[in-house]
Image: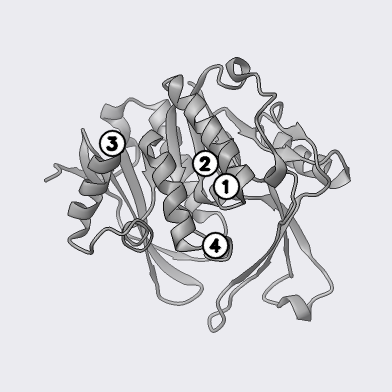
């Protein structure tokens, strides 16, 4: 099976124990993450081969982060050693009454200053089937955006499928900035993770019947597959989830409804992305819906 490459910033997450807020704690739980890193780790845990493309400082924190990926079986040989800091984010876990809260501290991180000038493209993309990145990477400044575009275009030239998750973060940039960046890379994207809200609020599609709007979006940008997750929030700890995919050749498929108790919401969408990408590389398209236990129905 071919491997995936994930492109994005590795972050260190600090969370107070339990349901404490930042100002209530003097102890921290420490995790290594970031959207694209979550996908790489989940893909590796499923039994696939994942490689990550990012930048970390050559210091104790950078080495800790690199070791965390290596422990999960992720190939770190293309991580650039540069800069002086790893981006941080702080997560306060929500309760039944209080929503979760994320605070970023990632300016001037190693990845935000990274450029792909010294990459050996042949080695990076050897036996690679999919390149995955997200809107978060594009939101980290002009240099990160230009670097991502260069990597995406190089992968596309080599007929490697591009996977993209909108992952819009209002704390990082504006809707108009996101729209400009998304429109630049979407023509290269094959597999897209998003929602109807991304299409209406960011790209400006008119609200209409959801399947028609997604079909129009896929036609406009020649997207092969659009995947989404519908989440109904009963409380901060009780959610109902349903996954959907629309494949332009195979039609539409929905998962059953799942009622779940939320232990840690961070990375849930990334786990879904990793599972779907694993199926794309591991199974034939004819058996994809069966392996996902989805109910395939013919598209309109």
Give x and y (percent) for residue 98: 57, 81
Q: Are marks 2 and 1 in contact (CB under 8 Å)?
A: yes
Residue at horizontal 57 percent and vertical 59 percent from the top: 266
Query: Which mark's residue is nearer the viewer, 4 or 2?
Result: 2
Q: Are marks 4 and 2 in contact (CB under 8 Å)?
A: no
Q: Which comes sooner in the sequence, label 3 or label 2?
A: 2
Residue at horizontal 11 percent and vertical 46 percent from the top: 300
Distance in Å between CA atoms under marks 4 and 2 = 20 Å
The residue carrying mark 2 is 133
Residue at horizontal 32 percent and vertical 44 percent from the top: 226
Query: Which mark's residue is nearer the viewer, 2 or 1?
Result: 1
Dot 1 falls on a residue whose secondary structure is helix
Distance in Å between CA atoms under marks 2 and 1 = 7 Å
Q: Residues within 10 Å of mark 4 (few under 14, many from 20)?
A: few
Residue 220 visible, this angle: yes
The residue carrying mark 1 is 137
Location of residue 20 with respect to 205 vertically, above or below: below
Q: Residues within 10 Å of mark 2 (few under 14, many from 20)?
A: many
Q: Residue furthest right?
A: 60
Residue 47 visible, this angle: no
Q: Which comes sooner in the sequence, label 4 or label 2?
A: 2
The residue carrying mark 3 is 222
The residue carrying mark 4 is 265
Q: From the viewer's perspective, tell me whether residue 213 is left or right of residue 138.
A: left
Q: Residues within 10 Å of mark 3 (few under 14, many from 20)?
A: some
């Amino acid at each position: 099976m071919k491997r995936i490459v994930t492109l994005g910033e590795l972050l260190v997450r600090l969370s107070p124990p339990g349901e404490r807020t930042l100002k209530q704690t003097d102890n921290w739980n420490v995790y290594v993450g970031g959207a694209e890193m979550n996908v790489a780790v989940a893909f590796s845990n499923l039994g696939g081969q994942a490689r990550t493309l990012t930048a970390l400082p050559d210091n104790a924190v950078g080495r800790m982060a690199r070791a965390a990926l290596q422990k999960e079986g992720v190939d770190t040989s293309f991580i650039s050693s540069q800069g002086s800091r790893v981006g941080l984010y702080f997560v306060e876990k929500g309760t039944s009454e209080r929503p979760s809260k994320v605070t970023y501290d990632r300016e001037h991180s190693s990845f935000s200053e990274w450029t792909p000038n010294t990459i050996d493209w042949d080695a990076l993309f050897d036996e690679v089937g999919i390149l995955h990145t997200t809107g978060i990477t594009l939101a980290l400044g002009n240099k990160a955006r230009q670097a991502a575009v260069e990597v995406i275009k190089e992968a596309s030239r080599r007929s490697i499928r591009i996977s993209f998750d909108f992952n819009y973060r209002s704390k990082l940039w504006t809707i108009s900035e996101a729209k400009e960046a998304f429109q630049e890379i979407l023509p290269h994207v094959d597999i897209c993770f998003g929602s109807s809200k991304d299409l209406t609020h960011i790209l400006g599609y008119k609200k209409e019947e959801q399947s028609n709007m997604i079909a129009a979006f896929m036609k406009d940008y020649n997207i092969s597959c659009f995947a989404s997750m519908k989440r109904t929030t009963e409380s901060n700890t009780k959610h109902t989830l349903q996954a959907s995919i629309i494949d332009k050749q195979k039609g539409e498929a929905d998962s059953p409804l799942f009622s779940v108790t939320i232990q840690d919401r961070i990375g849930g969408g990334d786990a879904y992305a990793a599972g779907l990408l694993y199926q794309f590389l591991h199974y034939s398209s004819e058996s994809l819906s069966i392996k996902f236990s989805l109910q395939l129905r013919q598209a309109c």
